[in-house]
Each structure stands twice: as structure tokens, then as C-alpha cells.
Amino acid sequence: MTQLAKFLSLGILAVMVWIKLMGITDPDTLLYKCVVFPLPFWGVVVFGAISAAIVLYRTFTFNDCPDAAKELLEQIDEARKDLRKRGMKSL
Amino acid sequence: MTSNANDKYSILLPTYNEKENLPIIVWLITKYMDEGKYNYEIIIIDDGSPDGTLDVAKELQEIYGASKIVLKPRASKLGLGTAYIHGMKHATGNFVIIMDADLSHHPKFIPKFITLQQEKNLDIVTGTRYSGNGGVYGWDFYRKLVSRGANFLTQILLWPGVSDLTGSFRLYRKDVLEKLVSNCVSKGYVFQMEMVIRARQFNYTIGEVPISFVDRVYGQSKLGGSEIVQFAKGLLYLFATT
């Protein structure tokens, strides 16, 4: 099964659950009007908010690795010196 | 442990205009591989670089010997996927390591890849910038945001079971790499994603080692609109077909 098929199956399942919920909730109640009927909308909002929070958190905590850059620059010098000593002319 | 003295590592270095970086990366590879007493060879696949990368490679071959440095140049720029096929044909090791020659992938991580592979008897070990001590040097906020966003979207859509799909610092069993390359159709860095997704389909075991990625010290690294479009297309292709 492709990822697309998995997502379609999950989507259909979610729609069926939603329709069922609408069927068993009294349409005149606040619960129906504010929660059950607009459930797909709330789903998108909650998913979007959580996703944005995760991506932002990971962006701010992305390791900067300044030590790795420093180590590399030192090793570049070392490599050049050693290779010249071993007869590398193009350096 | 499955460590054995017969293991040999073929390190593939596809190059294009890497005259400055090639001597350094080769020096670093030999340093860490010699320290670990590993049996290895470095296969340089230069795609007709106009800056004379191949001449530099020949000089390195004279210094380190033809058994350590193997030159398999091609006449023109033919792309990464075919460079791996070309390099693999000449690889004499039972493991293949692929990495960028631009110094963004530090050879100090290779012994860690090898150790993890031996401990868990894995088919593939991939470097990851996104977990543990992994990270990136030289990226601004925008670049990090795009990278994290793209990675998040990929995780949501593909459920790859691997935290870094677009990285290209990896160790493969040679037969596994051969099978994967022959089953992959994508180009560019979508190719790296497809390799991992296909590996999952074939039930290969994959391990991850956190790496620090130091973005190009020499030369330019770019992330433009066309890269993002290429990524999005590749992601949707894999989403719909795998």
C-alpha cells in the first residue's frame, strides 16, 4: 500500500467517525454547533498549530556546531602543511 | 559482533570542481582510517572538472599509492546516481561509504559508522543532522527553518523511520547499495530520500549516527526556489508511489 493509499484510508475513516458523531449529537446543542460540526476545521487548526510549534522549536534548537567548524579549520591547516611536506606541489 | 579482518571499505568521492577540498578530505580520510586500522580505498570519480581537480587527484595518488587512491574519472557531468554506479563497479570493498568531497562531511564520523554497523550488523548507517548531537554550522535562521520544515513534512508524509533523509553521508553493504541504486529513479537529493525509502521497502536495517555538518568552507552552497520545487516534487512522487 502506498503512503497515498494509507492517507486516503485514514481520511475516509476520519470522515466516517465525524459523520457518526454528527448523527448521535443533538443538532440544537452548543456542543454540536461549536465542536462536532466544525470538527474538521478544528482538526486542521490543532494540527497546524502543533506542527508550527514543533518546527519552530526544532529550528531554534538546531545545533550550531561552532566547535566542529573550528576543528575543521585547524585540520585544514595541518593537512596543507603535511601534504606540502610530502611533496604536493599544487597546494 | 561481526567485525572481521576481511572487511574492506570503499569510499566513493564524486567530485566536480573540488581542487581546494580534495587534498584535505583525502588527508582526513586516511588519518582516521589509518588510526582505526581499517582496510580501505578511496575512489575519486571526477566529472571532468574544468578547475583541474583530476590533476590534484593524480598528485594525491602519487603520495598515497594506487591501492589507496583509485581514479575513475568521467568525461562530463553525469549526475550523482550514475557516479555511484560507476564508482561501485570498481569498488573492491564489501562496504561502500558515500560522502561529499566539499568538507561538509567530516571523515572523523566514519569510524563511528563502522562501529555501529558492526555492533548491530546493519545494512546501512546514515549520518543525521537532526538528532542527538547532530547539527549544522553556517546556516542562518531561514535556512534552518526551511530545512526543519521540509524534514517535518517528509516525516509526516513518508514515515521513513530515519531522521535525516536528504543527507548523503552513508555507509552501505555493497550488495545493498547495488540493489538500491538499480531501483531508484530520482535525481539530485531526492535520490538520497528515495534510497532510504526503498531500503525500508526491502526491509534493510538502518542505523543513524549524529553528525555535525559544516556547510562549505570553500565555494558556494545554495538553497533557491528551484531546490525547494525539486524537493516538493520528489516528496510527492515518493508519497504517491511508495
Image (cartoon, coloured by chain):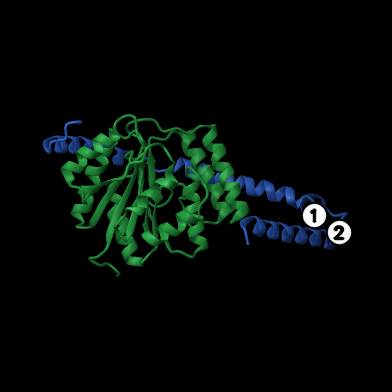
Q: Secondary structure at mark 2?
A: loop
Q: Residue at x 21, y 40 (%)?
A: B60
Chain under numbered label 2: A
Q: Quadrant of the N terminus of chain B?
A: bottom left
Percent across and percent down for residue A12 are 74, 59
> Which mark, by number, is residue B189?
none
Colour for chain B in the figure: green
Can residue B27 be seen here? yes
Q: Residue at x 22, y 37 (%)?
A: A74
Q: Return the disc, 2 or 1, that comes first in the chain's sequence.
A: 2
Chain under numbered label 1: A
Amino acid type shown at disc 1 = Leu
Percent across and percent down for residue B158 are 56, 54
Classify residue B242 by image quadrant: bottom right
Q: Secondary structure at mark 1?
A: helix
Q: What is the crowding at mark 2: few (fewer than 14 residues within 10 Å), some, or many (at least 20)?
A: few
Q: Residue at x 33, y 61 (%)?
A: B116
As displayed, is residue B112 above or below residue A64? Answer: below
Q: Residue at x 23, y 39 (%)?
A: B58
Q: CA distance from mark 2 to mark 1?
A: 8 Å
Q: Which residue in the structure is indicated by mark 1?
A: A31
Can residue A71 be seen here? no
